Amino acid sequence: MEKEAVRKEEVNWTEYFASIVAVCPWSKAYWSKQKIDVARWQGTTNVKPLGDYVARMWIHKNASGRQLCNLHHTMNEQRQDEEWLYSHRCYGGHSTPVPVLIQQDLKLLTKIRKGLNG
């Protein structure tokens, strides 16, 4: 129930993922299949494995772009089988409407990227 509350309260994720198909072609399909989780950031020690999800959007509501950048470097060092990205509206473009850290399965992401480039 909390997950659903996070989704409804913060962002229309369905609309967001549809808007970034040009830069992230798989995101809308994975969102539709409920393979992308949304959670509130609760610190580096509370990160859970992705399990059956391909990605998790960690909402870090009051983080600055610089904080997210630093956290993304930390998480990429600590969790080598994942790729961590970040998004903040201060960067414009296809940024998320709320500050987020993005946790993804590195093996799957690499496979997807190779499929798109090969």
Image (cartoon, rainbow, N blue to C red):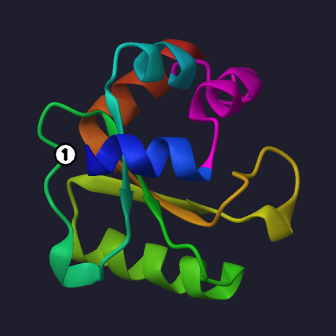
Q: Note whether residue 105 is visible.
A: no
Q: Note whether residue 112 is visible.
A: yes
Tell me the magenta residue range: 11-26
Q: Tag 1: Cα neighbours inside 10 Å, few (<14), some, or many (≥20)?
A: some
Q: Nearer the viewer, residue 115 or 26?
A: 26
Q: Amino acid at mark 1?
A: Leu
Residue 24, image quadrant:
top right
Quadrant location, the N terminus = top left
Residue 111, image quadrant:
top left
User: Is residue 85 toward the left or the right of residue 24 in the image?
Assistant: left
Q: Is residue 32 magenta?
A: no
Which residue was labeled with disc 1? 50
The spot of residue 101 in percent (x, y) is 48, 63
What element does badge 1 sit on? Answer: loop
The spot of residue 94 in percent (x, y) is 79, 44
Q: Is residue 22 magenta?
A: yes
User: Is residue 32 toward the left or the right of residue 97 in the image?
Assistant: left
Q: Is residue 90 above or below residue 70?
A: above
Q: Is residue 95 above or below residue 43?
A: above
Question: At x 55% / y 51%, what residue is drawn?
Answer: 9
The spot of residue 38 in percent (x, y) is 39, 47
Question: At x 37% / y 71%, what residue is drawn?
Answer: 41
